[in-house]
Image: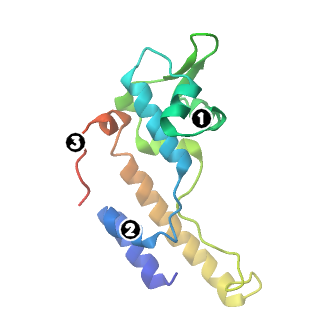
Amino acid sequence: MSFRRLRHFMQLIELRDLRNISSYGIMMKRNSKLSLALHALAQMAETLNRPKTSAAIALHNDTNPVVVRRVLGLLREAGLVTSEKGHNGGWLLARPPDRITLADVYLALGDRFLRPEYDGEDNPPECLIERALLGRVESALQAAENTLVSRLQDTTIAELRSTELTPVD
């Protein structure tokens, strides 16, 4: 990706222009862990005092309960959910849904959406030009990532449950 396209991509993030950001699909990977985590948290927010089982969450999200446990385990480590063992056990929110932001979830999962692609025949690591550009690209991607996290802090799980989310302009 050229620096011009990268700069444009960063401007789209800053402007919250999600419709046009999708045209940069090559730079943004679909994060199924984030999607699963957000769906699960929204489900837990519906039934605050009743634990949700991994099996129920998995069924609702068309995945395997083991995948659910792995993802929610990361959220438990971050203090976003708790788990109860036993026949009536399951997963519960560790704090009210209006106190859990999308940024909390995103950071708890530890995956980055934006990553430079260092490998490949087009940019071998021994190429001096490529090595010189890597630092600048990484810096630009980190700035975009910081903007993304900043924007995610503006939305809570409670707001996700709302049927009328404000569209992003």
Distance of mark 1 from mark 2, alpha carbons?
A: 28 Å
Question: Which residue is at a point 47% across and 69% down the rendered structure image?
Answer: 25
Instruction: Please give the residue where the numbered disc 3 appears in the rendered image.
Output: 164
Question: Which residue is at a point 51% across and 46% down the rendered structure image?
Answer: 34
Image spot of residue 141 (x, y percent): 51, 68
User: Is 128 left, or right, of 169 in this rendering?
Assistant: right
Q: Amino acid at mark 3?
A: Glu
Distance of mark 1 from mark 3, alpha carbons?
A: 27 Å
Distance of mark 2 from mark 3, alpha carbons?
A: 22 Å
Element on which disc 1 rests: helix
Element on which disc 2 rests: helix
Image spot of residue 138 (x, y percent): 58, 71
33 w.r.t. 126: above or below: above
Image spot of residue 93 (x, y percent): 47, 24
Image spot of residue 102 (x, y percent): 42, 43
**Answer yes or no: do the residues labelled 1 and 2 have beta carbons within 8 Å?**
no
Q: Residues within 10 Å of mark 1 (few under 14, many from 20)?
A: many
**Answer yes or no: do the residues labelled 2 and 3 have beta carbons within 8 Å?**
no
Q: Earlier in the sequence, mark 1 or mark 3?
A: 1
Q: Residues within 10 Å of mark 3 (few under 14, many from 20)?
A: few
Question: Which residue is at a point 58% across and 33% down the rendered structure image?
Answer: 72
Q: Residues within 10 Å of mark 2 (few under 14, many from 20)?
A: some
From this viewpoint, is residue 58 visible?
yes
Element on which disc 3 rests: loop
Instruction: Please give the residue where the numbered disc 1 appears in the rendered image.
Output: 68
Q: Amino acid at mark 1?
A: Val
Q: Earlier in the sequence, mark 1 or mark 2?
A: 2
Q: Quadrant of the C terminus?
A: bottom left
User: Is 138 left, or right, of 130 in this rendering?
Assistant: left
Q: Quadrant of residue 101?
A: top left
Instruction: Please give the residue where the numbered disc 2 appears in the rendered image.
Output: 21
